[in-house]
C-alpha cells in the first residue's frame, strides 16, 4: 500500500488565496453598502427638499405610494382656490405649486379711464401772426379740453386758443366739430368753448379743496397734439403751488403724472373719476422730470360761470391801455424815445383811459407816488385797486411833465 504524502507548501499557498478572496468579498460588500447608503441618503434629501419647497409655497408635501413614480411633466392634479385653474407646470411643477390667472377683468385705473375718456377732447387751432417786418404767416397749435355739458360746452386753457381764427374739436370717437369762443380769461388761463352737439359724455365735477398730498391723480389729454386719449397716472405732489404762467401768477396743483405739450386744457381726475383740475403747465428742463401743474377746479368754476354768462370775468380792474417796457438806451434810440422805462403803447378808443387823458407814447414815471421801473410793477399796482378807484399817474409827454387822475375800469 502506498502511503499518501502531504505537500505542506501547496497547502499553505491555497489557504492564503482563500484568505485574499475573503477579504475582497468583504471589501465589495462594504463598497456596496456605502453606495446603497449614499443612494438612500440622496433620495431622502430630494424628498425633504421637495417637501420644504412645497411648504414655503403654501402646500403640504405629498406622499407617494411605494413602487410608483410620478411621470415627468404630469399635472400636479391640484386646483388653485384663488383662480380655479389647474397648474400646468412642466419642469417646476413637481417642486413648486404654480398658479395661473383667470384673465378676468381687472379693477383699477382702467375702469376710471373707461368713464372719463369720452369726455376729454383734442383741439386744433389755426390762426395768423406777423413777423418782425409785419408780414403775415399762418400758425397752428394743438391742445386738449374737457366736455362740461352734454350740449357742448368745453373747458380749455386760454393759451391753447389765443390767436386762433379756426378752432376744431375732436371727440374720442373721431367726430370733429367747429368751435367758437364763449369767453376767455388770460389772467386765469381759462377759456370756454361751445360746439353744436347733443348727448355728449360730460365730466363729473369734483372738489379740489378736499385733496390731500398723495391722492391719486390721472391726466387725460392730447400730448404732442397727435396722441389723443393718452392717459398718465401719478399722485398729487403738492397743493397751492404759486407759479408764473405766461406772465400771470397762478396757484396750482402739482402732480407727477406725465404732462407734455398738447396736454394743456386736458383733465386731471381723482380716483373717483371726478374732474379736480385743468392741466396748464409743465416745468420743462433737461434736469427736471415729473413736475406737472393744473388749475384747481374750485378756482375755475366761478370764472367759468362769468365766462358763460358775460363772456369775461367780472370785477377785474383794468385801464384799457397796453404798456411797453424799454429796457436799454439802444432800444429807446431805435424807437426815437428819450428815456428808458415804461411807456403807454396803445389806448383803447372811446375808453375811460382816453377820456382821462392818457395817450400813446406817454412815459410813466409814477403811480400813486410809487416810481415805476417795470410793466409788471405797474400792473401789480392796478390789480390791488377796485373798479371805480382813481389813481394818480405822473408822466412825461415829450418834455412836458403831466399829472393825471385816471379811473380804474372793469376788464372785459
Image (cartoon, rainbow, N blue to C red):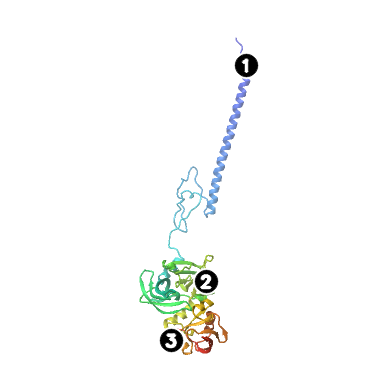
Q: Quadrant of the N terminus?
A: top right
* Whether residue 371 can be seen here: yes
Compare residues 307 and 163 and report the one nearer the observer: 163
What's the CA distance linking mark 2 and mark 1?
Answer: 114 Å
- Give the SS element for disc 2: strand
Contact check, label 1 and label 3, Cβ < 8 Å? no
- Give the SS element for disc 1: loop
Against 60, residue 247 (above or below) is: below
- x and y, in percent, of residue 114 in the image: 42, 68
Q: Exactly how many numbered labels are in the figure? A: 3
Between label 1 and label 3, give the one nearer the viewer. Answer: 3
Which image quarter: residue 225?
bottom left
Compare residues 98 and 33 and report the one nearer the observer: 98
Which disc, if any, is residue 254? 2
What's the CA distance linking mark 1 and mark 3?
Answer: 152 Å
Which disc, if any, is residue 349? 3
Q: Residue at x 55, y 40 (%)?
A: 39
Which disc, if any, is residue 73? none
Which disc, if any, is residue 7? 1
Amino acid at each position: 500500500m502506498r502511503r499518501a504524502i502531504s505537500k505542506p507548501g501547496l497547502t499553505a499557498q491555497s489557504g492564503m488565496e482563500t484568505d485574499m478572496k475573503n477579504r475582497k468579498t468583504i471589501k465589495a460588500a462594504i463598497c456596496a453598502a456605502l453606495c446603497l447608503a449614499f443612494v438612500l441618503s440622496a433620495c431622502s434629501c430630494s424628498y425633504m427638499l421637495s417637501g420644504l419647497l412645497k411648504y414655503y409655497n403654501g402646500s403640504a408635501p405629498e406622499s407617494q405610494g411605494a413602487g410608483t413614480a410620478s411621470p415627468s411633466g404630469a399635472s400636479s392634479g391640484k386646483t388653485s382656490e384663488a383662480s380655479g385653474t389647474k397648474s400646468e407646470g412642466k419642469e417646476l411643477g413637481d417642486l413648486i405649486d404654480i398658479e395661473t390667472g383667470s384673465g378676468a377683468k381687472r379693477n383699477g385705473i382702467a375702469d376710471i379711464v373707461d368713464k372719463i375718456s369720452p369726455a376729454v377732447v383734442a383741439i386744433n387751432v389755426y390762426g395768423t401772426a406777423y413777423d418782425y417786418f409785419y408780414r403775415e404767416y399762418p400758425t397752428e397749435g394743438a391742445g386738449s379740453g374737457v366736455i362740461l355739458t352734454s350740449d357742448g360746452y368745453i373747458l380749455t386753457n386760454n393759451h391753447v386758443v389765443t390767436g386762433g381764427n379756426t378752432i376744431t374739436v375732436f371727440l374720442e370717437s373721431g367726430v370733429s366739430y367747429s368751435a367758437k369762443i364763449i369767453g376767455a380769461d388770460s389772467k386765469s388761463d381759462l377759456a370756454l368753448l361751445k360746439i353744436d352737439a347733443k348727448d355728449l359724455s360730460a365730466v363729473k365735477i369734483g372738489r379740489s379743496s378736499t385733496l390731500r398730498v398723495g391722492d391719486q391723480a390721472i391726466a387725460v389729454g392730447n400730448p404732442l397734439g397727435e396722441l389723443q386719449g393718452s392717459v398718465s397716472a401719478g399722485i398729487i405732489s403738492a397743493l397751492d403751488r404759486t407759479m408764473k404762467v405766461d406772465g400771470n401768477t397762478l396757484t396750482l396743483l402739482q402732480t407727477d403724472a406725465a404732462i407734455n405739450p398738447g396736454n394743456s386744457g386736458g383733465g386731471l381726475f381723482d380716483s373717483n373719476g371726478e374732474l379736480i383740475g385743468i392741466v396748464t403747465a409743465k416745468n420743462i428742463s433737461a434736469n427736471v422730470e415729473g413736475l406737472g401743474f393744473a388749475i384747481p377746479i374750485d378756482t375755475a368754476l366761478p370764472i367759468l360761470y362769468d365766462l358763460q354768462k358775460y363772456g369775461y370775468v367780472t370785477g377785474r380792474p383794468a385801464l384799457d391801455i397796453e404798456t411797453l417796457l424799454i429796457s436799454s438806451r439802444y432800444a429807446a434810440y431805435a424807437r426815437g424815445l428819450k428815456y428808458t422805462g415804461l411807456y403807454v403803447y396803445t389806448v383803447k378808443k372811446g375808453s375811460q383811459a382816453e377820456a382821462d387823458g392818457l395817450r400813446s407814447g406817454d412815459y410813466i414815471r409814477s403811480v400813486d407816488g410809487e416810481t415805476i421801473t417795470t410793466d409788471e410793477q405797474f400792473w401789480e399796482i392796478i390789480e390791488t385797486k377796485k373798479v371805480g378807484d382813481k389813481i394818480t399817474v405822473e408822466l412825461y409827454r415829450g418834455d412836458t411833465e403831466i399829472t393825471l387822475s385816471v379811473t380804474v375800469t372793469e376788464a372785459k
